[in-house]
Image (cartoon, helix red, strand yellow):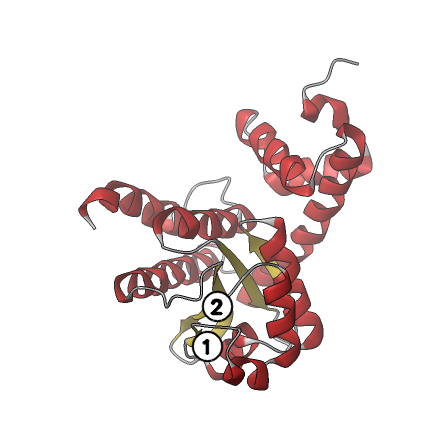
Amino acid sequence: MNGREPQVIDTFLSLTDTLVSDFDALDMLTVLSERCVELLDVSAAGVILSNGRHGLSVAAASSERSRLLELFAVAIDSGPCLDCVRDGVAVISGDLDSAEARRTWPHYTQGALEAGFHATHALPMRLRDDVIGVLTLLSTSPDPLPADDARLGQALADAATIGLLSERAVRRAENVQEQLQSALNSRVIIEQAKGVLAATGDLTPEEAFTLLRSYARGNSLRLTDLARGVVERTVEPRTVLGVQA
């Protein structure tokens, strides 16, 4: 723990610092998924949020592969992450190639294995009885997640949940579900902007997203506002890509 302690502290601060004027829930959840990969013995991570009306949407992911698997799970309404949201408890599948996993989530298991993931650890994002989403940790190895990593992963999920819900307290005029729905709506704009940048610069979706985030941070812009500008062409895509006209 000592070797990663400074980064752990920095991550908790990033997840709970919702008092800044430019707080962006979507960017915070992206930080959560990326830091999980850096701090834990996992290969990828993703976040699925509930919109409060029994609907689920992918809000963030550390890679394109994990995002697509999360989208697949939501589409087929099956998998450890879906069970976690419904029951509000952690769901661990240490070896997705096992007979039990294939029997419990046949379609999800097949999709995960084809994507190169052999283990899933789904952690609830909850406050008391209110489950607002799930943090999914994915591994290319069938080995179980170390106990210390599982505890830290749940602590990070709890911190992100507190961050999202404290934003509601700061902005009392807005309902927490409206906050979550806003983040999900922002995800759509982000995906559209990624597509524009990827097509313009002949990039992968991950490369396009990295450039989008870097430009937003380098120019003190909200990620969602920049993405909307790219989609609506009020921001020239080639400018974000750093290409001279």
79 up-or-down from 229: above or below: below
Quadrant housing the C terminus: top right
| Precedes in sequence: disc 2 or disc 1 | 2
Q: Residues within 10 Å of mark 2 (few under 14, many from 20)?
A: many
Residue 192's mark? none
Q: Given the current orientation, which residue lies at the most extreme left position?
A: 2
Percent coordinates x, y for residue 133 in the rendering: 52, 69
Residue 18 visible from this viewpoint: no
- What is the secondary structure assignment of the residue under circle 2? strand
Position of 121 with respect to 148 (left or right) is right
Q: Residues within 10 Å of mark 1 (few under 14, many from 20)?
A: few
Q: Nearer the viewer, mark 2 or mark 1?
A: 2
Q: What's under tag 2, amino acid-wise? A: Thr
Q: What's under tag 1, amino acid-wise? A: Asp
Identify residue for label 2. Answer: 120
Residue 16 visible from this viewpoint: yes
Residue drawn at (50%, 56%) of the image: 45
Identify residue for label 1. Answer: 130
- Of residue 184 and residue 23, the one placed in the foreground of this image is 184
Residue drawn at (60%, 28%) of the image: 215
Percent coordinates x, y for residue 149 in the rendering: 31, 60
Real-space Cα distance between discs 2 and 1?
Answer: 23 Å
212 up-or-down from 14: above or below: above
